[in-house]
Amino acid sequence: MSVACDVAVIAGGVGAARFLRALRLMDADRAVAAIVNTGDDTVVNGLHVSPDIDTVIYTLADAIDPERGWGLRDETWTTMQSHRRYFDRRPAGSAAPNNWFNLGDRDMATHLYRTARLAEGASLNDTTQEIAKAWGVRFDIVPMSDARVETRLTLAEEVTSPDGHTYQSGATISFQEYFVRLRHAVAIAALQFAGADTAVPNRLDLLSTAGTVVIAPSNPLVSIGPVRALRGVDTALAARRDSVVAISPIIGGAALKGPADRMLREMGHEATALGVARLYAEICGVFIIDEIDADLSSNIERLGMRCIVTRTIMKSDDTARALAATVLNAGSR
Ligand code: FO1
């Protein structure tokens, strides 16, 4: 069944979740769909974890831990602590509970539910709808595909993780090994989205029928990149380029959170709003940058994009609402 929406947001984790919350603050009745990256998904302790989906749902439910930006507020960690008894008993290479990816006691209920539903044959999309509704979220939260697409990173150097595991230069690892186990403190040489060439995107129709498409202020390479790698996504965006609005996740040459700036440089791009605009020029007609980057505006317009300069750091609810209003005004067709 296809239901049109006013706004479709291509989303990663924290930055996208905050922007979606801004849309909700502005107008809770607007029909909004978020197409969310699942390249970060992982199996931990046998449980299917979808970090970006859960960050979006928990944020929209006002249940997210605001400091960490992931997991639940007022969380407890009893199960995690109880795993410690077994850590030293695991044979090498065992996938039994690790001591570097933290699952809170309450958060775990979400992963148990998702894992059980997937095991009985439900799709990731249906399961996500059920979880979102259970948290009272009215926006349509859509995993980018029901098929497994795995973001993998090739290391540019040898590195030892804080828990003592050494990875050789040239090793290819999962996103969570890079992000959590290695705390993204290692240079990367290559990126791939395994499975993206055959995975069927969910709700591709939204990208054509939505009044406005927004590319959220998320990492352009590992949050937006996996969605764009799916067949038909870039073509659908390019066909309605003038009403696709992107918000730069790079402000003053740095990412607000996470390794996007370093990663851009390592992958041969400029770590500025202009560098991100270049990555989006074919698929996006309006590019929103922060006031601090106003001097980049004319170079961005030379790429054939309309550039809007405004406050993009959603420090207060008022700034968040104002950003959402600017984005929607700019992208309505
Ligand atoms: N991020 C961390 O830095 N450390 C963790 O132990 C961790 C656990 C975790 C559990 C569930 C979940 O939904 C997210 C979690 N994250 C953790 C965040 C997450 O891995 C990353 O922020 C995203 O993948 C990046 O978008």
Image (tube, helix red, strand yellow):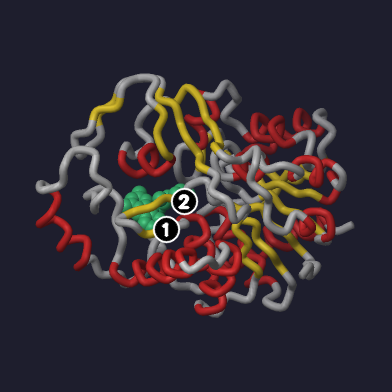
Answer with mark 1 or mark 2, whichever residue precedes in sequence. Answer: 2
Q: Which residue is mark 2?
A: 41
Q: Is residue 52 above or below residue 27?
A: above
Quarter the N terminus occupies: bottom right
Q: Position of residue 137 (x, y in %)?
A: 58, 75
- Residue 198 figure quarter: top right
Q: Is residue 97 above or below residue 304?
A: below
Task: Name the residue type under label 1.
Answer: His
Q: Tell me: is circle 1 under 8 Å from ligand 1.
A: no
- SS category of the residue bearing label 1: strand
Q: Give the CA distance from mark 1 to mark 2.
A: 7 Å
Q: Position of residue 139 (x, y in %)?
A: 65, 71
- SS category of the residue bearing label 2: loop
Q: Is residue 231 above or below residue 263?
A: below
Residue 235 shows in this picture:
yes
Q: Nearer the viewer, residue 60 or 313?
A: 60
Q: Which residue is mark 1?
A: 48
Q: Nearer the viewer, residue 182 or 172?
A: 172
CB atoms of marks 1 and 2 within 8 Å: yes
